[in-house]
Image: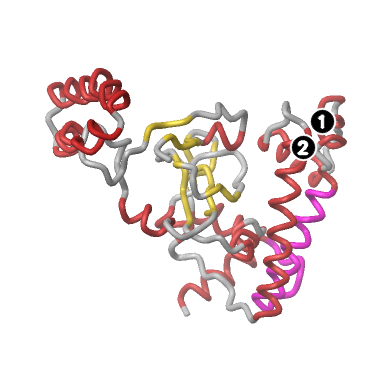
Amino acid sequence: RHIRPYRNGRDLTGKSRNARVLDFFGLTADDLRLRFPEAYQHLAETVREDRRTQMEKSPTTDSRAYCEKWWLFGKPRPDQRDALANLPRYIATVETAKHRIFQFLDADILADNMLVCIADKDAATLAVLSSSAHLAWCAASGGVLEDRPRYTKSRCFDPFPFPLMDDAIRSRLRAAGEALDGHRRAVLADNPDLTLTALYNCLEQVKGGAPLDAKAKAIKQCGLVIILRDLHDAIDRVTARAYGWPEGLSAEAVVVRLVALNHA
C-alpha cells in the first residue's frame, strides 16, 4: 500500500521506467519506525541525510519543512490527495510537451510535479480537453519553454469555458473520450517500442498530408493512426455540437468564441 507507482512526463510520452516510490503520507516518524522499521532505516540513512544537507546549504522555509518531515515523499499536497481520494482514475497532461495529450492515470499513481493533474474521472471531460477547441485555446493562452508548448493551469485550464452539456451530449462525449483513451492504451500495449510522442508525430504528418518515410509508415500501420485521427475528428464534431457551433471553424474563430464565453 505504501509502495506506489510514480510517473513523470517522459514516462507518459515516452518509455515508462515503471518507477515506484515509498509513500508514507499520514504516518508519523514513530509510526513508520514501529510498523516498517526497514523502510525507516533506509529513509533515515538516505533521504534524511540528503534533506539535512540541503537545508544547511539553503535554509529556506521549504527546506526546513522537508527536513522536518524527512520520511514523507516530496511535498505531501494534501489538497490534491483529498481531491483524488475517491476517484478510480484522474486526468493528467505533461506541463511542457510537443503534443498536448490528456490521458487517464490510475488513482494509485503518484504524479511528478511537472504533470498537471485534473481530479475528474469523466471521459467527457477528457474528450473536451482533447478537442481541437481546447488545443486552440491552449495555443493562444499558454506559454512556451524553448520550442515546446507549456500548459499553465492558471491560464489554460482555470479560465477555459467548458460547454454546458445535456445528458445526451455528455453521453456522446463520454463515449468518444473512452474510445480515444482505450485505443491509445491498446496500441501502446500491443507495440512496446511505440510511444505517445511517436504516435502523435505520425498523426501530425498524416493530418498535414506530409509524405511519410518508412519509419512513419510503420508507425501509421502498427499504431492504427488513421483510427486515432478518426477518433479525434469524432471528438471535434461532438464538441462543436456541445458548444452549438458549426463544424470546421478555424482556430482563430474558435478562440474568439471561447473568449466571448469566458467573458460571459
The residues colored magenta run 227-250
Q: Label 2 is placed on what type of residue? A: Cys
Lower position in the chain sequence, tag 1 or tag 2: 2
Q: Which mark is residue 6?
A: none
> How far is disc 1 from disc 2 in space, using C-alphas?
6 Å
Question: Relative to the observer, which residue lies in front, 43 or 51?
Answer: 43
Name the residue that disc number 2 marks.
Answer: 202
Q: Main secondary structure of the magenta part?
A: helix
Counting from the top left corner in percent of width and height, residue 36 is at 30, 31
Q: Secondary structure at mark 2?
A: helix
- 154 to 29, vertically: above or below: below
Q: Amino acid at mark 1?
A: Ala
- Of 101 and 247, the residue lying toward us: 101
> Mark 1 — residue?
216
The residue shown at (39%, 38%) is 2
Please identify the quarter of the rendering in which residue 221 is found.
Answer: top right
Dot 2 crowding, Cα within 10 Å, few <14, some 14–19, many 20+: many
Tell me: 133 left or right of 110.
right
Which residue appears at 61% of the width and 47% of the height? 101
**Residue 46, above or below 106:** above
**Image marks 1 and 2: residues in contact by CB distance under 8 Å:** yes
Say which quarter of the image contains residue 11. Answer: top right
The image quarter in which residue 232 lies: bottom right
